[in-house]
Image (spheres, rainbow, N blue to C red):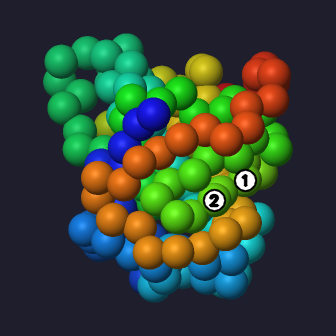
Amino acid sequence: MGRLIGILRKAAYRAPVEVLDEAEVSPELGVAGDYKGAKYPRRAVTVLAREAWEAALADLGEEAALDWTARRANLLVEGVELPRAVGGTVRIGPAVLEVTYPTTPCARMDEAFPGLKRALYPDWRGGITCRVLEGGHIALGDAVEVLHAPPERKIRLPG
């Protein structure tokens, strides 16, 4: 079992991130106050594993000392291997999320650090994109548990 170690939201497209200690998560809004949840319910919440983030940075070398917020994922977890297949489910505190896509790294990653986009491609390092099945109030330190992990689906992301 892992734990939730980071929460953030973005009020608008390309807006600065706001780091939070707690948040409401719902099927209707995703992370409350984040612009994507209401607009894209199947892509409402993105989750990044600290271990995957650190592996991507290690590929880039010592000079890539970036904070996880550069990835712009809504939630950062540690100590758990996230499902690597569509249909996987994860419980974070009271919230239950279903994997709908791997999170495809965008050009913003290379704006943060050259080569980051490519370093996030292998092994679902960019994280998972989810829809919210069950909402609730989440907070830093909440338990993270994989409820269902279908067999890994190897994907080839563009780039």
C-beta proximity under 8 Å, tags 1 and 2 = yes
Amino acid carrying mark 1 in the image:
Glu
At 67% from the left and 69% from the top, the residue drawn is 134
The picture places residue 126, in percent across and down from the top left corner, at 54, 37
Assess disc 1: are there few (<14), some (14-19) or many (≥20) residues with their C-alpha within 10 Å of its C-alpha. many
Specify whether 106 is left or right of 70: right
At 25% from the left and 68% from the top, the residue drawn is 21
Q: Is residue 24 above or below residue 154?
A: below
Q: Quadrant of the N terminus?
A: top left
Q: Regarding mark 2 in the picture, which secondary structure is present there?
A: strand
| Residue occupied by mark 1 | 98
At 60% from the left and 73% from the top, the residue drawn is 135
24 or 153: nearer the viewer: 24
At 26% from the left and 15% from the top, the residue drawn is 61
Q: Regarding mark 1 in the picture, which secondary structure is present there?
A: strand
| Residue occupied by mark 2 | 96
